[in-house]
Amino acid sequence: MNYNILPIVVSILSLGVGAWFARQILRKETGDQKMQKVADAIRVGANAFLKRQYKTIALITILVAAGLFAAYAASGDVPTGTKTAIAFLIGAASSALAGIVGMSISVRSNIRSAAAAKKGMNDALVVALRGGAVSGITIVSLSLLGIACLFGVYSLLGYEAVKIPSLIVGYGFGASLVALFAQLGGGIYTKAADVGVDLVGKIEAGIPEDDPRNPAVIADLVGDNVGDCAGRGADLFESTAAENIGAMILGAALFPVFGIKGILFPLVIRSFGLIASIIGTLTVKAKETENPMKALNRGYWVTSILSAVALYFGVKILLGNMWFFAAGLVGILTSIAFVYFTQYYTEARYRPVKEIAEASKTGHATNIIHGFAVGLESTGITVVTIGVALLAAYKFGDLSGISGGGLYGTAIATMGMLATAAYILAMDTFGPIVDNAGGIVEMSGAPEQIRRNTDRLDSAGNTTKALTKGYAIGSAALAAFLLFSAYLEEAHLKIVDLAKVEVFVGAMVGAMLVFLFSSLAIRAVGKAAYCIINEVRRQFKERPGIMAGTEEPDYSKAIDITTRGALKEMVLPGVLAVGVPVLVGVLLKAEAAAGMIMVGTIAGILLATVMNNGGGAWDNAKKWIEAGNLGGKGSEAHKAAVTGDTVGDPFKDTAGPSLHVLIKLLSTLTLALVALFL
Amino acid sequence: MNYNILPIVVSILSLGVGAWFARQILRKETGDQKMQKVADAIRVGANAFLKRQYKTIALITILVAAGLFAAYAASGDVPTGTKTAIAFLIGAASSALAGIVGMSISVRSNIRSAAAAKKGMNDALVVALRGGAVSGITIVSLSLLGIACLFGVYSLLGYEAVKIPSLIVGYGFGASLVALFAQLGGGIYTKAADVGVDLVGKIEAGIPEDDPRNPAVIADLVGDNVGDCAGRGADLFESTAAENIGAMILGAALFPVFGIKGILFPLVIRSFGLIASIIGTLTVKAKETENPMKALNRGYWVTSILSAVALYFGVKILLGNMWFFAAGLVGILTSIAFVYFTQYYTEARYRPVKEIAEASKTGHATNIIHGFAVGLESTGITVVTIGVALLAAYKFGDLSGISGGGLYGTAIATMGMLATAAYILAMDTFGPIVDNAGGIVEMSGAPEQIRRNTDRLDSAGNTTKALTKGYAIGSAALAAFLLFSAYLEEAHLKIVDLAKVEVFVGAMVGAMLVFLFSSLAIRAVGKAAYCIINEVRRQFKERPGIMAGTEEPDYSKAIDITTRGALKEMVLPGVLAVGVPVLVGVLLKAEAAAGMIMVGTIAGILLATVMNNGGGAWDNAKKWIEAGNLGGKGSEAHKAAVTGDTVGDPFKDTAGPSLHVLIKLLSTLTLALVALFL
């Protein structure tokens, strides 16, 4: 049996399901004219941004592809150069396509979810989640289809199965590169707009969030789409692609044991996960009075359990050694663990967020200090979970009795963790859709009952956004470990000896890259925000009719300034992320490069955890105070909490998520260039 | 010739010079009664803190010593357990003694420097620097004397020279443990008081710094002594001790080449460095109109050049291979590089601080974001400098043609870097002395001219405090690399293979420890500060006469609350720092422990750099605005800058410096316990 047929068929069918969801959504009602006006402005702004962004990314991608080819050609290996460059371009194009499809449905689902909120909370929930599922399914299917097709084509061309995974590593690198810029650009955009709205609107002018008088308010709503939706989509596209390729390389190393089944196993498991996610999405339905988060969690459990069952049969049929099922279960459990402890660190009912809120009473500085402390603290449970997962998966793999089974165990744990990716992505994109729906309802002055419905969904959306970041970092960590092993395999390295001076220096540089990159990313937000703040102030000053409500602010000018700022600022950190690893690899060679990606990954996991959880906790501490605690809105504690939220914004929505991508880029890049480091 | 005589003689003579400096200072005039009253309050408060602190530390030290002995005894090796525990206790006691001597001179030098300021700036400068030199000389001499004596005693007992370094590793661990608690406790104390003074005094009550109406003002002045002076003293005591032991172990590995000379070379170079530092101190003299920093820098250059010359002859006579001189020069140059780029990141005349000040115009949040970005950015040059230094020193050592010469090259670079330690420590302790002198002058209402003199010195003191932190982190990095190598030597490990799953997990845990420790350290400041803020508010509220100036605030109550808070809060991070490495070593074994200390060190260097430089830059951005820029004191920009400074305080004065110590503790602890990890 040709196991490669299954992923191709499943991914094409899944794309069909995605299209069916999209058609369903597009047929839904689009609300009144006021709503449509707001939604149109968001859509136009988001499209304008994406168009410009992907133009820039296309240019960079072509340059890098040319560089890749030239580097291999210069070292005398034109065929590898050609194959790597082509795979790279296909990976980049697929990632971009997935992002564009997801986004274009998401900016159409928001108004339909808002309109559905008239009928009830559940209707709005279902529209938003299916809108999100279009993203999730498209992303995972395209990633799977791309790799399965490349594998198929090379098979038909007569290449040996064990050699093919190495030929398509460029695909992962292409996906990484696009993801990096998509996440960076989107992340800078969304937070620059958000900081601008918060600082000038809430604090200086004293008007509420989503107030139509604020010139940056549409830019802010656009930002939710281009940052959270397109950015995280590209991030997980990359994770799934990189995991597939890494696991296939390890499978190839076990060819004597499993034959081609070991190589294609990752694609089969991904196919099952996709089906499980679609079923999970379809089961979600909430009672009107229920917390929508409960309904979403039910869908997640359905997906997880189905994935576990599929994993059981997959292992039984293809590998025939049930220790690998245990390793896969470790991955699924890790995913659940991340979802739960991320809640602990970012939800107001637990100690960390309360601590920050409490500290806001003594001012801005103590709010910041405690938020930062919470972020740092949350690295503890993160590292322990990843550490236990790696050790356990390795142990189970080792117990299989197969030489090299330990590593393959960690690969299968990663597959387990990523099996639910499409559902997680649906939950993630659900966030910006309901956030936008809330904004549309607010700005169009809809009745109180509808607002209540969208507010409840918005609150659930904030939770899902935080959860998926936790999931993204956990899966990035496991995938990265897998990619190291693949890299060592490709570089013919048996060890990475950190006691060698050049490996240690490479390791330091890897960690430093993470810090420097974060500096550039958050500073970029500061710079772009600075422009918007000045623009909003200018509009308020020059046109006093705006605040009086007699004159409409110039939304498009604010969008334009944000777009230009974000795209300009994403270039430098992106270039750094690509340039430094190449430099280390060329100057200090393959083993030092291995030290760099490993320790860079560790530093990246930790710093991203600090930023994601610290940022999420600051955000919810502010919301908790706004809900009327500790003096509520307008109190001194609230002002301090707004400062914390504003600081946390670029942490959790720009630098943090970009670091997930950077981690994987380090691995896919070195994997694609390994021949030059020898 | 017995090369061990030289260090013993030099360190005893140096202690004599220290005593002579102290006598000189104590004979100086002590100013008027008002000044004496303030100075007495500081001295009493500092002594009370130190007494309680060292009681707690003594208890912990004895427990750890017992644990050390018990662990070795349980594994059946009573003799090693006894030797390690005894060396540990001697190291701990020497470190504590050095801290106490330094502090007791420093709290007597402050008022004498204040009184000398009546005569002129230079008089005050000389008193303060010599006061600092008492600390510096005592610390370096005691560290040297302790190791040289232990070496001598074991020689007399008939042990082979090559075996002795391993027997005295406990000394380094003892010094580390005391340093950790001294720095943590002092750091928490100083910043809790500082945050309290700033938030309630400056922001809420609108009274200036060092205003006698603020109940926490004396606690703040006490803090400068116990944090900067005693804390950094213990830090560099540990650096010098750990470097000596690590280098001696590597020297022992080269016994076939250099014989005993290679083992004792580190002690000889340290002796020369001590003499160079004393001469450097004696040459410092400033013109009345000159920037005092220039005079201090001249002394530093004299010390550096003399050290280089001494190194030249030391290498020529003892090792006879001039490539090692080149390696040593790398260390001296690294030290100079750190001193200069730390200035770039923390002084107001350069871009980073200006950027933060500029960002303060748009509010608290942008100030924080940019300050954090500056801190993250500064890791770039730090890592590049350390990386180049390690590679170059290794290369030079390698060129010597001696097998194992590369590593010994890095050891000699570390010796070069630490040769100037006593002078650097004098500059460092100079900081709190002149800070206190300024406070005394201010609180005693002395005339304008005297204030101008102490203000100029205070500003130079802020610079020296920042510089020595840069120096401490750089030397900690080099010393740590040396200690890894010593650890591998002791653990009989040839490699540290990061690709092994347990080593990778150990590495992650090492990095996580650094983050978790920092969380506890800065949160401790928040907690302690919270108490003081409430206490100051209570005093202001219950006794309105304080603000009117008719009633004296209760200083001792504020000191007492700070002391209790600081000592309570230092325990948890300290226990974590000791417990986690032991756990990793016992559970995951020696190679994983090596991964842990190496990657923990990298993470520690980076995070400490972020915190030290970010904190320093925030501080000086505030000072720059206070000097009248961007609206000056009381402007909105100033309020935002005060927030940044307050956030930066626990970063740069508690967590950052404690991380320097933690890095070395990781190494000395594993080195002392290595037998249990095999």
Image: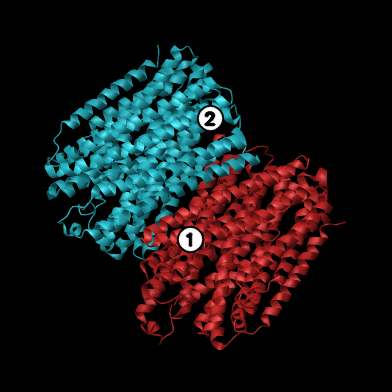
Chain colours: A cyan, B red
Residue A235 visible in this rendered orientation of the protein: no
Disc 2 target residue = A673
Q: Residue B353 carries which label?
A: 1
Amino acid under disc 2: Leu
Nearest the camera: A651 or A423? A651
Q: Residue furthest right?
A: B1
Image quarter (top left, top right, bottom left or bottom right) of the N terminus of chain A: top left
The crowd level at tag 1 (other Cα within 10 Å; few <14, some 14-19, many 20+) is many
Q: Left of B112 or right of it: where is A457?
A: left
Q: Name the quadrant containing residue A492.
A: top right
Q: Position of residue A657 (x, y in %)?
A: 40, 42
| Same chain shared by disc 1 and disc 2 | no
Image quarter (top left, top right, bottom left or bottom right) of the C terminus of chain A: top right
- Residue at the image position 28 percent from the left and 58 percent from the top: A537
Q: Where is residue B648 in the image (x, y as percent from the top left)?
A: 47, 61
Asked if residue A104 is positioned above or below residue A16 in the image, the reply reads below
Query: Label 2 is found on which chain of the structure?
Result: A
Residue B549 visible in this rendered orientation of the protein: yes
Q: Position of residue B517 (x, y in %)?
A: 50, 54
- Residue at the image position 22 percent from the left and 56 percent from the top: A208
Q: Left of A88 or right of it: where is A621?
A: left
How far separated are the C-alphas under marks 1 and 2? 39 Å
The crowd level at tag 2 (other Cα within 10 Å; few <14, some 14-19, many 20+) is many
Q: Is mark 1 on a helix, strand or loop?
A: helix
- The reply to whether callout 1 and callout 2 are in contact (CB within 8 Å) is no
